[in-house]
């Protein structure tokens, strides 16, 4: 007897549509899609934010960092300024989220819930947390066992 079957549907947009069409019974969705699903009457059985999983990690190689230092400084500046604007201008942020994620714009409660979650979650610094790096290292170690030897604390310390 099989209690669980994993189905790779690709993008999470397909997972939400498969839920809607009753092709699947459950899906792991990023918060913004989970809020839309909840607003449509689906039940949340686990909060994906509590999982040791990162939806949109920013990562690169040391080689790329060295070769593109100026570009990466610009990207980091845009990222930092975006986080500051996100937190300091909620109404403008809500309009932009709605513009880029129309499914959320149609569900104001879900849109606001999404904003509140990310406003609380965004770090005020671009220095990654030890918890975040450990999560990534565990994932990388599945493909390259050398990652098990890397200590997240040493990575964070090198950034301070």
Image (cartoon, rainbow, N blue to C red):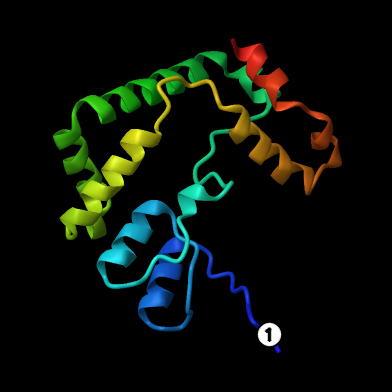
SS for callout 1: loop
**Mark 1 burial class by Cα count in 10 Å: few <14, some 14-19, many 20+:** few
Question: Left or right: where does residue 109 sit relative to residue 25?
Answer: left
Is residue 54 placed above or below 120 in the rendered structure? below
Is residue 154 placed above or below 14 in the rendered structure? above
Q: Quadrant of the C terminus?
A: top right
Image coordinates of residue 87 in percent, x first then y, are: 27, 28
Image coordinates of residue 133 in percent, x first then y, are: 64, 32
Question: Left or right: where does residue 5 sit relative to residue 39?
Answer: right
- Would you name the residue on which mark 1 appears? 2
Image coordinates of residue 145 in percent, x first then y, are: 85, 41
Looking at the image, can residue 105 be seen? no
Labels in figure, total: 1
Q: Quadrant of the N terminus?
A: bottom right
Quadrant of residue 104 within the rendered picture: bottom left
Residue plotted at (46% across, 62% down): 12
């Amino acid at each position: 007897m099989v209690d669980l079957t994993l189905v790779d549907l690709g993008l999470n947009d397909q997972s939400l549509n498969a839920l809607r069409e009753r092709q699947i019974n459950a899906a792991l969705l990023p918060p913004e899609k989970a809020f839309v699903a909840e607003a449509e009457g689906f039940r949340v059985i686990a909060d994906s934010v509590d999982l040791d999983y990162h939806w949109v990690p920013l990562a690169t190689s040391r080689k790329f960092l060295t070769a593109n230092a100026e570009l990466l400084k610009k990207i980091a500046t845009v990222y930092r300024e975006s986080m500051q604007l996100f937190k300091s201008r909620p109404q403008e942020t809500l309009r932009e989220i709605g513009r880029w994620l129309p499914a959320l714009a149609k569900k104001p409660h879900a849109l606001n819930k999404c904003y509140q979650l990310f406003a609380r979650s965004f770090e005020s610094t671009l220095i990654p947390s030890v918890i975040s790096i450990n999560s990534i290292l565990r994932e990388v170690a599945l493909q390259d066992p050398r990652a098990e030897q890397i200590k997240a604390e040493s990575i964070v310390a090198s950034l301070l």
